[in-house]
Image (cartoon, rainbow, N blue to C red):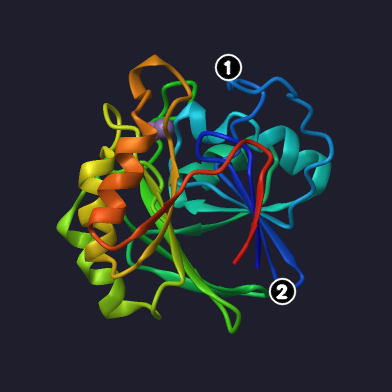
């Protein structure tokens, strides 16, 4: 499994023969210099919720790649009006795809589409196959519902958690989230993109290390083999 980070909450994960793009927000990211998205060619685009900093580049990338969208019912319907095809999920539900199983899990946050229309309730994804199992939390507060993940899904190899505070949990709460989901390898996201979510990265890494866990903070464009 190979993971590539595009900044904010945007990840491209290749597992088996499939490529999954999570929450594409590249052309609007003020910290990214190279905003060319034409080379991104996923098979599926997984969307945690409707906010613009998670869906901005969905339409362009889906239309150029033909990728299938996977999100909640309302987000899929909204993109359906733009002639994009998707698979709708709702909370607690899972479905089997060619690359593995996806479960849409609870997040505590809000969700409206960029035009202000209803975006359903926000969620995260647990994805698993023979190769790996991981949790992409989306935007969320720390919530006790995270304790359900190790009770209902295979053991996680890694988890992608927001750590930027203000709009989501901060890194202190994300340490507890990592404990709730029983995962020692955490990849941080949703930090340093704009002023509200700038964090002390040294302190964040230390907070995880003090809890016996690893916080990985990737540079934009960096890849990681997992
Ligand atoms: Ni959001
Ligand atoms: Mn966000």
Residue at left offset 48%, top offset 21%: 115
Camera-nearest residue between 131 and 220: 220
Camera-nearest residue between 25 and 177: 177
Residue 181 position in % (x across, y down)? 28, 66
Camera-nearest residue between 148 and 114: 148
Rendered view: 4 above or below 212? above
- Dot 1 falls on a residue whose secondary structure is loop
Horizontal side of 154 relative to 85 (left or right) equals left
Q: Quadrant of the C terminus?
A: bottom right
The residue to which callout 2 is attached is: 16
- Dot 2 falls on a residue whose secondary structure is loop
Q: Ligand 2 quadrant?
A: top left
Quadrant in the rendering for residue 100: bottom right
Rendered view: 160 above or below 37? below
Q: CA distance from mark 2 to mark 1?
A: 32 Å
Residue at left offset 29%, top offset 70%: 182
């Amino acid at each position: 499994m190979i993971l590539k980070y595009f900044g904010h909450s945007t990840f491209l994960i290749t597992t088996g023969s499939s490529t999954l793009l999570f929450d594409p927000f590249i052309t609007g990211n003020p910290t990214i210099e190279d905003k060319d998205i034409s080379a991104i060619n996923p098979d599926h685009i997984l969307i945690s919720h409707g906010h613009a900093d998670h869906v901005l580049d969905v339409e362009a990338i889906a239309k150029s790649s033909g990728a299938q969208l996977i999100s909640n019912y309302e987000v899929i319907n909204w993109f359906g009006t733009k002639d994009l095809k998707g698979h709708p999920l709702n909370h607690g539900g899972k479905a089997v795809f060619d690359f593995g199983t996806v479960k849409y899990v609870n997040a505590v946050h809000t969700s409206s589409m960029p035009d202000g229309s209803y975006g359903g309730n926000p969620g995260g994804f647990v994805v698993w196959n023979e190769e790996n199992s991981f949790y992409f939390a989306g935007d969320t507060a720390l919530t006790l519902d995270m304790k359900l993940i190790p009770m209902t899904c295979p053991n996680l190899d890694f988890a992608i958690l927001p750590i930027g505070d203000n709009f989501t949990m901060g890194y202190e709460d994300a340490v507890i989230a990592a404990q709730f989901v029983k995962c020692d390898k955490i990849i941080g996201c949703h930090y340093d993109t704009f002023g509200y979510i700038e964090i002390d990265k040294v302190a964040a890494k230390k907070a995880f290390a003090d809890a016996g866990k690893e916080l990985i903070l990737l540079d934009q464009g960096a890849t990681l083999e997992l």
